[in-house]
Image: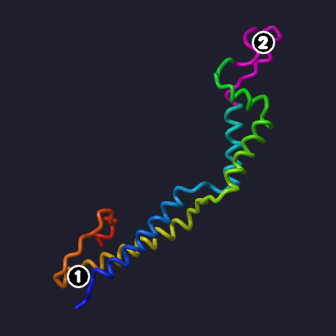
Amino acid sequence: MTDYLPKVARVRAQINKLADDIRELSDGMPPKEEALAAVDAHIQREAEKVTIRPSAVTGGGGEFVSAYPESPHAYACKFFPDVIRNRLRTEVEAIYQGEVTITDDQKQERLEAQLLELERQEEAVIREAAADGKSIPRRSDANPVVLLD
């Protein structure tokens, strides 16, 4: 007679570990190069919010520089982009000096495929136990796709 509980416990331990690894990857940060590129894109977006109207001094009237947006940061990005870029890049670089988890979509997909396979193994053991008259409760977070296989 097979003891199904240790089998299910082993598979569930692997499932929990893999699920934690997947969560850590999905909560990770983008590669540093992407983050640094995002700094440049941010400065560009903010600078575009500010309008310079040279016609204000050539007889067209009105404000020389737009009064909106009301964000001093947007004006700093417009008039001092290199200063802002250097400061923000320094801050981003400092974050990546520590221990960080970098998102990796391909690795996450592989881990998710492995997780699905482990969940199928778990369900197979549960069904085998049921066929032998043993009842093993399913996890509340079991993948419904596996239950429908």
The residue sitting at the front extreme is 98
Residue 137 versus residue 48 in the image, above or below: below
Can you give x and y, in whole percent of width and height, for residue 123 in the image?
30, 75
Can you give x and y, in whole percent of width and height, for residue 105 in the image?
56, 62
Q: In this figure, which residue is indicated by the disc labeled 2?
A: 56
Residue 47 among magenta residues: no
Magenta-tinted stretch: 48-66
Count of marks overlaid on the render: 2
- Quadrant showing the C terminus: bottom left
Task: Say which quarter of the image contains residue 16.
Answer: bottom left
> Which mark sits nearer the N-terminus, 2 or 1?
2
Q: Secondary structure at mark 2?
A: helix
Q: Amino acid at mark 1?
A: Ala
Q: Secondary structure at mark 1?
A: helix
Residue at x-position 65% and y-position 57%: 31
The label shown at residue 27 is: none
Q: Main secondary structure of the magenta part?
A: loop
- Quadrant showing the N terminus: bottom left
Residue 136 versus residue 79 in the image, above or below: below
Can you give x and y, in whole percent of width and height, for residue 81 in the image?
77, 35
For residue 91, side relative to residue 4 (left or right): right
Label 1, residues with CA under 10 Å away: few <14, some 14-19, many ≥20: some
Q: In this figure, which residue is indicated by the disc labeled 1?
A: 129
Residue 40 versus residue 104 in the image, above or below: above
Residue closer to the observer: 142 or 54: 142
Tell me the distance, in whole angstroms, between the alpha carbons under discs 2 and 1: 83 Å
Residue closer to the observer: 91 or 46: 91
